[in-house]
Image (cartoon, rainbow, N blue to C red):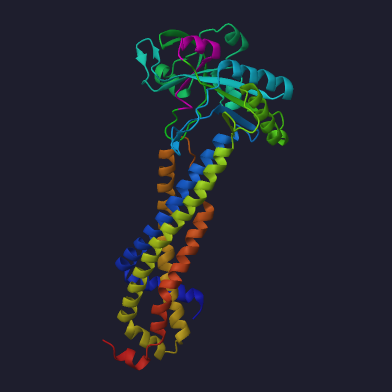
Amino acid sequence: MNIKENVDEGLRSIQSNLLRTVLTALIIAIGITSLVGILTAIEGIQNFVNRSFADLGANTFTVENRVDEGFRRGGRREKQYPVINYQEASDFSRRFRNEYGGTVSLSANIGGAVQVNYLSKKTNPNINVMGADDDFLGIKGYKIDQGRNLNRNDLENSVNAAVLGQEVARNLFGNIDPINKEVTFMGAHYKVVGVLAKKGSMGGGTDSDRIVIIPLDNGRGLAANRALTYNITASAPNVEDGENMIEEARGLMRRIRGDKLGTEDSFTLERADAMAKEFENITGYLRIGGFGIGIITLLGASIALMNIMLVSVTERTREIGIRKSLGATPRVIRFQFLIEAIVVCILGGIGGLFLGIIIGNVISNSISTDANFVVPWLWMAMGILVCVVVGVLAGIYPAIKASRLDPIEALRYE
């Protein structure tokens, strides 16, 4: 009996016990769903993170305040570092541009829970108002959807001009053109000069689409006497010089801040792609964990499948005796039962693949609002391979037991 005949025979046996086959396939499908679903969700989130950081480039870095966690070590409180002020940020920007030819953007968080109004419409009080310069959009990977970016005239004259995030513009204006319309927030009126393209963000798009960008000096005036925290985002002129420029920027900032030789930095300097690499390492561990969970689930499914195959051997003892009396060898009997187990696993596995892909993409889209639909071909192939392995492991013992039946005793079985 060749492979095709064995497969046909296995399918006929499956059709004759359809309910049992469906229940067995469902057990396998659940295992594959958990395996492929978790890995698909991780893949979708990873792709989104990679796309988010791709626009920033490997030669982009940020200089921010050194955060004091407030812990005590050995009875002594950790040292608190002064925040980066406007003078230091401006000095760094000017000198980095002149000495190294890099691009620098200064920004400050003016308000983090702001309500924006247009006529009778208003947003939820969850809008982030940022003061920034004209390089902010390009260096942060934003794109203009309507209107224009802030220009030098807006910055130098502290004009009440605003660039709205996609979600802010949609909630206030709907299908109306927002350009040159006047919005109100934090007690001041601003003319809309541009709208950002949808960018999306993990956790609901708070920092990317719920944002209003105004000229930096205008934002300083809007904050009045409140102390602002200034962030510096810089980019080296060439990707090849990225590492060297970062170290040069570190030295420049230490000189500006007056950090003494041998002491640690009074600020933090981090590459834009560092977070993406760190997240990739984390997802690597998550993949291992997800694969482990899926394998444990499939192990339980393989035990259930083995039990069902043993029942099948008992039910078909007389059939096995007839086959042996007609010349079927133990090898043929073993192969037939193995094929049946593998076919059941593959049928369940195919259903599990589709469910896993759908569930995984639903999870990734619920975590990251702008994640694309992912079809993980590698994990699909891995899932089918695992199905075959599970089928072999679950079917090998029942197949051996069936092949060792004595044909005379088997024919007498009732």
Most extreme residue toward the top, as rendered?
A: 157
Residue 403: quarter of image: bottom left
Q: Looking at the image, which residue is at 32% across and 67% down?
A: 18
Residue 180: tell me if it is visible.
Answer: no
Q: Looking at the image, which residue is at 31% across and 76% down?
A: 311
Q: In this view, does 387 lie above or below 251?
A: below
Most extreme residue toward the bottom, as rendered?
A: 408
Q: Is residue 220 left or right of residue 366?
A: right
Is 219 covered by the magenta stretch?
Answer: yes
Residue 325 percent location from the top left of the image: 40, 91
Q: Which quadrant of the figure contains the C terminus?
A: bottom left
Residue 369 percent location from the top left of the image: 44, 35
Q: Looking at the image, which residue is at 47% across and 47% down?
A: 42
Residue 122: tell me if it is visible.
Answer: yes
Q: How many labels does the image show?
A: 0
Q: Nearer the viewer, residue 38 or 155?
A: 155
Report the span colored magenta: 207-226
Most extreme residue toward the front, as rendered?
A: 75
Q: Is residue 27 left or right of residue 382?
A: left
Residue 348 percent location from the top left of the image: 40, 61
Residue 189: quarter of image: top left
Residue 355 percent location from the top left of the image: 40, 52
Is 222 covered by the magenta stretch?
Answer: yes
Q: Which of 248 and 354 is in front in this view?
A: 248
Q: Is residue 215 above or below residue 281?
A: above
Q: In this view, does 20 lie to the left or right of 371?
A: left
